[in-house]
Image (cartoon, rainbow, N blue to C red):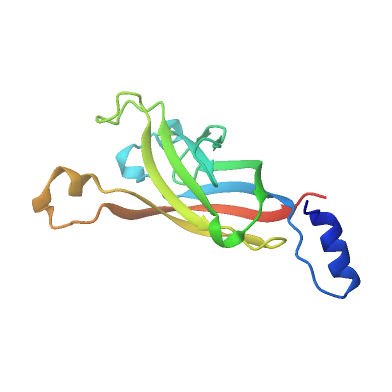
Amino acid sequence: MFDKTRFAGELKKKGVMVDEEYESYLCLKIFSAEDIDRATMNPNGELRRYRALIWVRHMDEKYITPIASGLPNPSRDSACIIPLGIYEHFRYFLHVEVYRTCSKSDPGSSSGVALVGKTRIPLPKLGHKICGRFGLVRPNDAASSSSDSGSDLGCIAEGHIILNMETKRFF
């Protein structure tokens, strides 16, 4: 039977570099979102409420931020730690979807929840940090309702999300 630990130990004695597998996690902090709704749509922007839905590998393992409110830049300042398992940075992306909740102004939404922007960001290498402002896209309602609108795009760019993420390993 193959004993991985013993085999790795023998390779280290011979001076061979061994890349051991280890568990890792993502530390994520979302600071705010910018320009996700036009202020002209609702002059009472402070009454608008937003949540972000976050996942890395499977949507079954999703995280939901607390409610943030206000326009034009609802502040979140929420943080979470997402387990990644055995880490391979080239295979993982951070998925972020921002939703407007408790909204009476969204005619197509019977639940009062509407997607206002989403993005997919590659995770940093293990032990590295990424801080930045990332563009959001939202579904183009005009393209889906009318093919004569001149825009065949399924999504349009609108707004940004500001976040910080770092991958770390469990010791």
Q: Is 12 placed above or below 25 here?
A: below
User: Where residue 118 sits: x, y (%)?
Assistant: 42, 48
Query: In the image, what residue occupies the spot 30% across and 24% down?
Result: 110
Query: In the image, what residue occupies the spot 54% across and 46% down?
Result: 57
Q: Is residue 45 visible?
A: yes
Left/right of residue 59 with respect to residue 148 in the rendered view? right
Left/right of residue 34 with respect to residue 9 in the rendered view? left
Q: Is 66 placed above or below 9 here?
A: above
User: Where residue 153 sits: x, y (%)?
Assistant: 23, 56
Q: Is residue 27 visible?
A: no
Which residue, as the protein is rendered here, is positioned at the far front? 1
Query: In the image, what residue occupies the spot 55% across and 42% down?
Result: 75
Query: In the image, what residue occupies the spot 67% across and 55% down?
Result: 166
Q: Nearer the viewer, residue 162 or 137?
A: 137
Q: Nearer the viewer, residue 122 or 105?
A: 122
User: Where residue 8 sits: x, y (%)?
Assistant: 82, 62
Left/right of residue 63 with respect to residue 83 in the rendered view? left
Q: Is 68 placed above or below 128 here?
A: above
